[in-house]
Image (tube, rainbow, N blue to C red):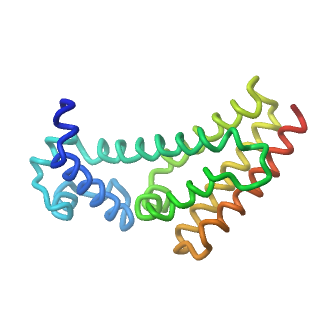
Amino acid sequence: MNTKGEANRSVRATRRRLCDALVALLVQKPVRDITVRELTRLAKVSRGTFYFHYRDIYQLLDQLEQEQVDQLNLFMDALLPRLDSDATPTALHALFEYLDQNDAICTALLGPNGDPAFVQRLQTVISQRCMGYMAPQGGTARQRYLTAFAVQGCFGAIAQWLQQGKPEPTEQMASIAWQGIRAVQRQIAAES
């Protein structure tokens, strides 16, 4: 699609409706059980319109997932330079605010009907970024295990928080996550 088409408000609105419909369906069932017919019915667009924009549902899902990876990288850009701070960084608060404001898509992608390969991809991105920042030479095996522990622990806490309906405020969740991250970061720094 050309740049002019991408900038078109109508095109963006149609794509947003398709994304929103996919998210709504992913909360109910896995992507393999979602049909183009039910997706387009929910989005209130024709099947032809869907196929004008996407080859199949998996291409739409890939786009949705890539948007989340891009957003996560922006948070990581702001968060990594603050790893030595005892105070919970603004970027981590912003991440939990983002999760709160976008809970439907986050719950769908990180929940039981989400793609485990996507969750693994997110965890890999975070682990690599963290290790590259904390141990630029690649780190020791112990440092890599500690990083994996911290990343998977954060994902587990986020998934549980979302699935329970976000009972704790975002500030509290950011603080909890930061305490865990800092504990691991101190161990990694002690070995560097």
Which quadrant of the structure image shows residue 160?
bottom right
Residue placed at 74% from the left, 51% from the top? Answer: 181
Q: Residue 86 location in percent, x, y?
A: 80, 52
Residue nearest the observer in this picture, 101 or 48 = 101
Quarter of the C terminus within the rendering: top right
Residue at far top of view: 137
Q: Is residue 155 left or right of residue 97?
A: right
Q: Is residue 128 left or right of residue 56?
A: right
Residue displayed at 60% across by 66% down: 170
Residue 186: x percent and y percent? 85, 45
- 13 relative to 8, above or below: below
Residue 11 appears left or right of 132: left
Nearer to us in this view, 145 or 84: 84
Report the residue at 76% width, 41% height from top.
145
| Front residue of this view, candidates 81 and 188 | 81
| Occupied quadrant, residue 153 | bottom right
Q: Could you tell me which quadrant the N terminus lies in?
A: top left
